[in-house]
Image (cartoon, rainbow, N blue to C red):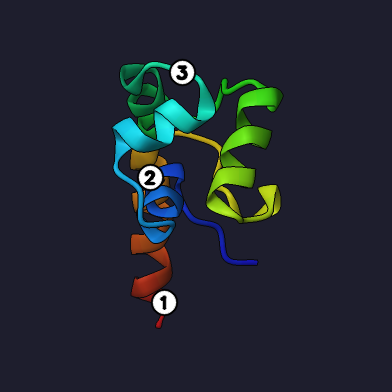
């Protein structure tokens, strides 16, 4: 299954960070923090963001953005 970062999901939804944060009821810096490392995001906030971005939770990568980049780079090396 393909997973994307919270930031990619937000961008795909056509929102900037301030718009998404306002819709989710959090400060834009809080959203930015979770876009960099979503490993400790609350389930309730993840639910809100998935509803806003119209994407299933299973499609969201939960972890550090640099780990996701490493995983994607490894996948490209195999092709």
Pointers 2 and 3 in contact (CB under 8 A)?
A: no
Residue neighbourhood size for the residue with mark 3, other residues' Cα within 10 Å, grouped as few (<14), some (14–19), many (≥20): few
Provide residue 8's location: percent of width, then percent of height. 39, 53
Q: Distance between the residues labelled 2 and 1?
A: 25 Å
Pointers 3 and 1 in contact (CB under 8 A)?
A: no
Local SS, label 2: helix
Mark 2 or mark 3, which has the lower sequence index?
2
- Above or below 50: residue 74: below
- Above or below 65: residue 8: below
Provide residue 39's location: percent of width, then percent of height. 54, 27
Residue 43 quadrant: top right
Q: Name the residue under label 2.
A: 7
Residue under the point 41% across and 36% down: 20
Mark 3 or mark 1, which has the lower sequence index?
3
Mark 2 or mark 1, which has the lower sequence index?
2
Local SS, label 1: helix
Residue neighbourhood size for the residue with mark 2, other residues' Cα within 10 Å, grouped as few (<14), some (14–19), many (≥20): some
Q: How far apart are marks 3 and 1 (CA)?
A: 39 Å
Choose mark 3 or mark 1, whichever is in front: 3
Q: Which of 23 and 27 is in front in this view?
A: 23
Local SS, label 3: loop
Choose mark 2 or mark 3, whichever is in front: 3
Provide residue 50's location: percent of width, then percent of height. 61, 45
Residue neighbourhood size for the residue with mark 1, other residues' Cα within 10 Å, grouped as few (<14), some (14–19), many (≥20): few
Q: Mark 3 points at which residue?
A: 26
Q: Nearer the viewer, residue 32 or 71?
A: 32
Q: How far apart are marks 2 and 3 (CA)?
A: 15 Å
Q: Name the residue under label 1.
A: 78
Provide residue 55's location: percent of width, then percent of height. 61, 56
Pointers 2 and 1 in contact (CB under 8 A)?
A: no
């Amino acid at each position: 299954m393909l997973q994307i970062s919270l930031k990619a999901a937000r961008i795909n939804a056509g929102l900037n960070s301030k718009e998404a944060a306002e819709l989710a009821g959090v400060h834009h810096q809080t959203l930015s923090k979770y876009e960099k490392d979503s490993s400790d995001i609350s389930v309730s906030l993840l639910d809100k963001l998935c509803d806003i971005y119209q994407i299933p939770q299973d499609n969201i990568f939960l972890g550090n953005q640099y780990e996701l980049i490493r995983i994607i780079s490894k996948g490209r090396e195999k092709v």
